[in-house]
Structure formats: structure tokens, C-alpha cells
Image (cartoon, helix red, strand yellow):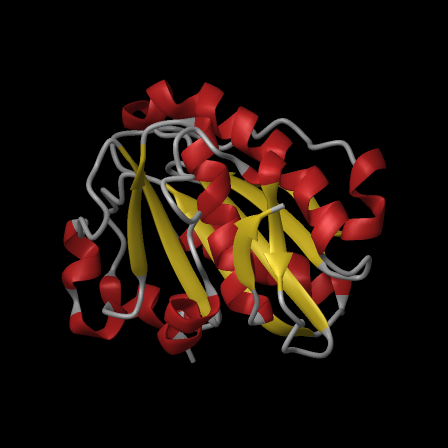
Amino acid sequence: MLFLAAAAAGVIWYLNGGGQRASLGEATLAGARQVQGVVCLDVAGDFSGSMDDSVEMRDEALALLKPFMARELRPDDLLTTVTFARTASLTLSPTRVGSLAKAVDSPGDQEDGQYTYFIPALKALDRAHAEDGEKCVRRVLVAITDGEFEDDVDKLVPLVHHFDLVHLAVPDEATGYRPTVFTDARLAAVVTEGFDSAEELSLLYGKALAAATGQRLARE
């Protein structure tokens, strides 16, 4: 079940105007971790043509995310990444935080086309976790996308609910913007947030992780 209450209570954005170009490089998870067991962060990157302008920001944000996870999370927590457009491609199988420094992401080979589908990405992530066999006590998803999907919403809903928390990171949109498919009441718990830089995107990763662990995202 999506846990927006934990997301609202467990995160403090940078205080006293500290958000100006701050990033995960200057962040920490403050307070005691509130969950026992493995926390899993899944990242889904939309590589359809309409998202071309965000590729560099995504690469930079992911480069900020990995050392943050190594510094702030348990070594057995997991990061998994997938890219998608018409089809999806796993680019990092579930990888322990303690192994991230040596992990090499595979290049995505997803196919583009007239339409973009989210379901293949969610299924690819589910398969990867099933094959890995590690149980996630909290599983969170950050999808970098404009959300212009052609999926059957009735098939999308149960897959989205495999996650405890879902963030849509939407470039160049105001926080709270709702892509059409996510106006369905069954997806109301999905959080949508805008970003316009790699630093802002990296902080959305930190925010999702803080909600998962029950901690606060704060300055070092």
C-alpha cells in the first residue's frame, strides 16, 4: 500500500533556503532509521523522444545518488534501474548498496515508437526482484517521465501498487502536475514532483529514500 503519510512526515527539505542548487552531495538522512530489513529503490527512466532534453540531468542525478546511498543506507539495501519507451530494458539489476561502487550500468536498448508504455518498465522491475529473491520491506519507485503513457489504466493500477511509494519526477513542470493517466482515482497516491536540474532530481531520490526509511533529508 502506498504510504503518503510516511512521505509527508518523514522528509524535511533543506531548511532556511538551503534548496538553491543543493544536491545529495551535501545531504544526509537524519534521525534513526525506522524500518528493519532491506529498502529497495527502483528508478525508471523514460527515454521516449519527448524526454530527450533530460538525459544529461538524469545521468548527473544518478551519479549523485549512488554515493549518497553508499554513505547513508545499509549495505544490503538495493538499487535497480530500468529505461523505457515503447519497450523497457533493465539497466542495473538489483544491486546491493555495498556493491554500487563497482557496479556497471548496462546501456538501455528499449525501443522507441509512436507511443510510450509504463507497464513494460514495471514488469521488468518486478521480474528483476523476483529473480534476485531478496524481500524488500519498503519498495519505492522514482520514475523520470512526462507521464504521457498509452497504457491500459486497469492493467497499470495493480502494478503500481506493488510499490509502497511512487514518485513521478516530471521535468519542467510544477510539483503536483498530473499526467492524464494519473488522474485516475486509483492512482491518486502517486506523488508528482517537478524538477529543472540534476541537483533537484537528485533531491527527489533522497526524498523518496527518506520516506522509505522514516528519516529526514537534511543538510550534513
User: Along the horizontal axis of the image, is 212 left or right of 190?
Assistant: right
Query: Residue at point 65% right, 78% down?
Result: 35
The quadrant in which the C terminus is found is top right
Q: Quadrant of residue 138?
A: bottom right
Query: Residue at point 25% right, 60% down?
Result: 152
Q: Nearer the viewer, residue 52 or 65?
A: 65
User: Along the horizontal axis of the image, is 38 left or right of 84?
Assistant: right
- Residue 100 locus on image (x, y percent): 78, 42
User: Along the horizontal axis of the image, is 185 left or right of 147?
Assistant: left
Query: Residue at point 15% right, 61% down?
Result: 183
Q: Nearer the viewer, residue 175 or 89?
A: 175
- Residue 16 locus on image (x, y percent): 38, 45
- Residue 13 locus on image (x, y percent): 42, 52
User: Along the horizontal axis of the image, is 172 left or right of 21?
Assistant: left
Give the vertical position of 148 relative to 197 (above or below).
below
Q: Nearer the viewer, residue 16 or 52?
A: 16
Q: In this view, which residue lies farthest toward the front?
A: 16
The quadrant in which the N terminus is found is bottom left
Answer yes or no: is residue 84 visible: no
Give the vertical position of 89 relative to 192 (above or below).
above
Count up the numbered dots. 0
Answer yes or no: is residue 72 visible: yes
Query: Residue at point 49% right, 33% down?
Result: 110
